[in-house]
Structures are given as C-alpha cells and as structure tokens.
Image (spheres, rainbow, N blue to C red):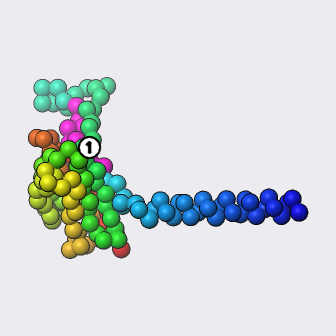
Amino acid sequence: MKTTVKFFVILFALAMQVCSVYADNKDNKGTPVTVKSTKDTPTVSGNIGPRRARAQVTTLDIDIYLDLTTRCLNFCDPEGRNITYNIYNEDDFLVAGGTISFAVEEESTVSLADLPDGIYTLSITCDGKTYEGEFGLEE
C-alpha cells in the first residue's frame, strides 16, 4: 500500500511539473536575439592590436525576441530611446530597415512575414553605437 501511495505522489508531482513548464512556455515572448557592439576587434592606432589585448564587447540593453509563430521581431525598451535597425540576408543585402521610437510605447513589432527562410543579420544603431546579432527564420 505504501509503495502504491508513493508511486501516485511521484506521478502527481511529475504531472504538476509538466503543467508548470507548459504554462511558463505559453507566455514566452519568443527566442531572445542578442546584439553586440561591432567594435569587438581591439585596435592600436587603427591597426589590429596585440593578441593579448581584450576586445571591448558590449551588448545592447534592449529586449529583442524572435517569434517564429508570427514571424516577427519584438523590441522592448523601457528607457524610451530611438533606434535604427537594418536586417541583412546571407548575401549581405539589405532586406528591411527602419526607425523605432520608444518614446510613446516601450514595445514595438517588426514583421518578417515577407522574408524567406534563412539566416539574417540584425544591425541596430542606438545612442550613436552600432550593435549586430544574427537570427534564423524557418518554417
């Protein structure tokens, strides 16, 4: 009897954990897209610096999520800044771009519905600095 009770307790706990994970994923904004500064190669007087020099890499503190279900990039910036974004395909051709102002609303969505599947580069300029990251579109 004790073994049966333990089995059902464990089974119940497992079922609750699965439900919890499903609930967490249901509200997921999408896959995060990380963009980093493009000045990641150390230089000395315009030349590539010594190998021991550390690269200065910073990430942009704007939340960017790729939603593959709706094929959209979701941007969120509670600080109310303006950004300029460009999206390049695998051949480095500009396929989308624009300016987003977060002064009125801190969230914005960019549709990628017209873009074919593939790997894309997202370039963002914010506060005079340029950041880049990659994301992939697939069915």
Under mark 1, the amino acid is Asp
Pick the quarter of the image with the C terminus: bottom left
Camera-side residue of 43 and 102: 102
Q: Residue at x 69, y 63 (%)?
A: 12
Camera-side residue of 128 and 76: 76
Classify residue 91 as left or right of residue 128. Answer: right
Residue 58 vertical placement versus 20 (above, below): above
Q: Position of residue 13 (x, y in %)?
A: 67, 59
Could you tell me if residue 89 is visible in this image?
no
* Residue receiving disc 1: 61
Q: Position of residue 25 (x, y in %)?
A: 46, 62
Camera-side residue of 79 and 83: 79
Could you tell me if residue 110 is visible in this image?
yes
Asked if residue 40 is among those painted magenta in the image, a careful observer would answer: yes
Across the whole image, how many numbered discs are drawn on residues? 1
Q: Residue at x 28, y 50 (%)?
A: 63
Camera-side residue of 22 and 129: 22
Mark 1 burial class by Cα count in 10 Å: few <14, some 14-19, many 20+: few
Q: Position of residue 82 (x, y in %)?
A: 12, 49
Classify residue 105 as left or right of residue 59. Answer: left
Give the secondary structure at mark 1.
loop
Classify residue 61 as left or right of residue 80. Answer: right
Pick the quarter of the image with the N terminus: bottom right
The residues colored magenta run: 34-42
Q: Residue at x 23, y 36 (%)?
A: 41
Q: Main secondary structure of the magenta part?
A: loop
Most distant residue in the right direction: 1
